[in-house]
Amino acid sequence: MFNKKKAKDSKDKRVPKKGIGVRIKKECAFCKSELDINYKNLELLTRYVSSRGKILSRRISGNCAKHQRKVCREIKRARFLNLIPYTGRVFS
């Protein structure tokens, strides 16, 4: 039949590999410090736009859902007012 002692021995020999499945939780920069999210603050907004002109996702930027919505809204306002380009720089 099944020997429980062998099963325990085989589990003891397994060593988890380092770095696999371990993620460090990113903290929202806006929750840490009282930064004002405004369409006029172009330096702040351009940090959350890729070189191709796409808005970075929460997973990459590390923002919480509340602040990610605000960042997206302000980037879209700045784009509408022509403060930030809709696309990235075009090199010819």
Image: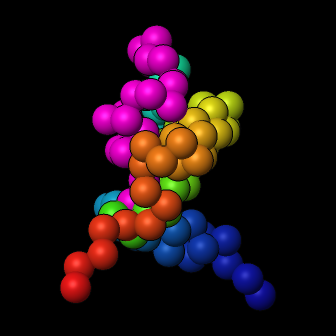
Query: Which of 32 and 20 lies nearest the eye of the viewer?
Result: 32
Instruction: Specify the segment rendered in magenta.
Output: 32-50
Q: Residue 59's spot in the image, x, y percent?
A: 53, 53
Query: What is the quadrant of residue 1 in the picture?
Result: bottom right
Q: Residue 87's spot in the image, x, y percent?
A: 44, 66
**Above or below, comparing residue 34 to residue 5 in the picture:** above
**Above or below, comparing residue 80 to residue 15 in the picture:** above
Q: Residue 63's spot in the image, x, y percent?
A: 53, 38
Query: What is the quadrant of residue 8 in the picture?
Result: bottom right
Q: Residue at x 30, y 68 (%)?
A: 89
Q: For residue 46: magenta?
A: yes
Q: For residue 38: magenta?
A: yes
Q: Residue furthest right?
A: 1
Q: Residue 76's spot in the image, x, y percent?
A: 60, 46
Query: What is the quadrant of residue 47 in the picture?
Result: top left
Q: Residue at x 43, y 57 (%)?
A: 85
Query: Which of 7 and 62 lies nearest the eye of the viewer?
Result: 62
Regarding residue 61, the answer to whether it shows in the image is no
Q: Which quadrant holds the C terminus? A: bottom left
